[in-house]
Image (tube, helix red, strand yellow):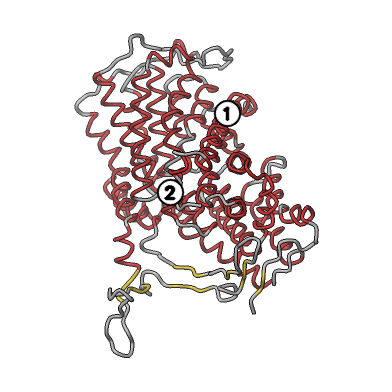
Amino acid sequence: MVWQQIYDPFNSPVLSTLMAAVPVVVMLASLAFFHVKAHLAALLALGSALLIAIFAFGMPANMAGSAALYGAANGLLPIGWIVLNIIFLHRLTTENGSFKVLQDSLARITDDRRLQLLLIAFCFGAFFEGAAGFGTPVAVTGAILIGLGFSPLAASGLALIANTAPVAFGALGTPIITLAKVTGLDEMELSMMVGRQLPFFSVLVPFWLIWAFAGWRKMLEIWPAILVAGVSFAIPQFLVSNYHGPMLVDVIAALISMACLTGFLKVWKPATVHTSAALTGRHDDSKIDVEHDEKPVPSAAFASDVKPAVMRAWMPWIILTIFVFIWGTQGFKNTFDTRPAIDPQTSAAKLDPQGKPMREANPVFAPILTFTTIHQQIEKVPPVVPTAKTEEAIYKFTWFTATGSGILLAAIVGGLLMGYSIPQLIHQYLRTLWVVRFSLITIVAMLALGFLTRYSGLDATMGLAFAATGIFYPMFGTLLGWLGVALTGSDTASNVLFGGLQRVTSEQLGISPVLMAAANSSGGVMGKMVDAQSIVVASTATRWYGHEGEILRYVFFHSIVLAILVGGLVTLQAYVAPFSHMVVGGH
């Protein structure tokens, strides 16, 4: 029997909206005010959502449980599978010392602190955001900057500011992949839309970063290098996101940006070398004497025996890029996930109306699991949709072509080439599984919460309320994404919480749902620098424990102003030509 969603169970829009918002409030309050660990906060929010969906909104208990399980399955594959295997690869490079070689090689390219900051915090940080995400870039770049002599406040704050423009495509496109699953929108269209928003800020953020560090005048002294870094990142970011997909956007853009900036620095030098690592215009009570810290060895000091070591250090990441690029192509997916459809009666190939051979799911590489309890058994009704519409719930277990499987194979190949034995790889993998166990629980619970919110209609109830913001919604919706990341610490988590809401609200207002779902992710990236988890990661990486409040106060202004600028761009894309012509999918 089909169950119709109920959007005002209390016959009071205000009360119904407040009740629908309880799971989100539980999640955010647990993280922001009660300092509950992320996996426990997610489980608490999921529990409250189950209770409200069943007892307040009348969703049958078996349907609520099935929706949560459907979300949990999507949390494990592909999302959790990506996280587990990318951290496995990162641990392999750290354990055998190749990561330290990468760190040292970056430090030798230039002794100008501003250029070091561009190369490490922006370019190299973006690479790790693209490859791993989930706090890795801030931890890595913060530690490197400290090693180069930057003060803890500078290393922490600047690493956080730099880790913005790449975040929406972080962890091999996980935020966009998740956003597509939660909203039901096309993954490629979302990738294209975010790729038409963030490149503007990929050019702006490097300038903003150096201005925040050294001031306006010192920033202008190296504007050619900043422009090279920003433009060489922004153009690949646009091209890959619009013509390939979300998985390799940051990895490719960061590699190109690093190569272009490094090459440019071989033919261009600033008129004056800025050797101070202190923040301009601020009293810095750090215990590290940045003025007298040992300077990095200049690029000329690269010995012939060092270069092979550097190449070996980059080798596993190059292998990763190749594997993930192959795994991201649609042709590769079609080869394994589908097979020619055969008519069982005639044993002939089935043809579509145009006479072309049809393909069906391959039961070996892409078995299908239908959640029959909710598949086409839940109906969205007006005013959320123009006409009543049933929801599908089909889970494709694409175990081989999942991005995480490509990462795992890349890690195994890279690990063997780095000298690991099979038993050592197994040992490291089990250790990685133990390390990320709580992260996997968090991801599973968050996806279960997002899918339950969607199938129970809780997001629709909140969306109907937010639609009251009318013409101002593009700005409001963007800042909603910022708030989600600021409080949850994850662009992926923010997309899970608010992605469905963005779609519902935008459809109510006649605004492109692809635009506003993308705005949730693009606006969210600017909240990354003020979320509690990232700040704790930064303070830990820089060994500046107990100073999280100082880091937050330093980055807050930059975060909110940049978020408003993203909201301004989204507003222009919603209403004003020629920006509106950039919108994917129409209205």
Q: Is residue 387 above or below residue 584?
A: below
Q: Quadrant of residue 532?
A: top right
Residue 180: give its label: none
Q: Looking at the image, can residue 170 be seen?
A: no
Q: Looking at the image, can residue 114 be seen?
A: yes
Which residue type does callout 2 highlight? Answer: Ser
Task: Say which residue label 1 marks.
Answer: 561
- The x, y position of residue 222, in whole percent, is 37, 17
Which residue type does callout 1 highlight? Answer: Val
Q: Which residue is located at x 71 percent, y 44 percent?
A: 29
Horizontal side of residue 164 vs 556, given as left or right: left
Rate crowding at label 1 as few (under 14), some (14 to 19) or many (20 or more) other CA atoms within 10 Å: few
- The x, y position of residue 345, in whole percent, is 32, 90
Q: Which residue is located at x 76 percent, y 57 percent?
A: 16
Q: Is residue 584 above or below residue 128?
A: below
User: SS for tag 1?
Assistant: helix
Q: Is residue 344 above or below residue 65?
A: below
Task: Say which residue label 2 marks.
Answer: 191
- The x, y position of residue 384, in whole percent, is 63, 60
Horizontal side of residue 363 vs 507, given as left or right: left
Horizontal side of residue 302 vs 549, given as left or right: left
Q: Is residue 153 above or below residue 400?
A: above
Front in this rendered view, residue 26 or 461: 461
Horizontal side of residue 26 vs 267, given as left or right: right
What is the quadrant of the N terminus in the image? bottom right
- The x, y position of residue 237, in whole percent, is 37, 40
User: Spatial distance from mark 2 to mark 1, Cα to Cα?
Assistant: 24 Å
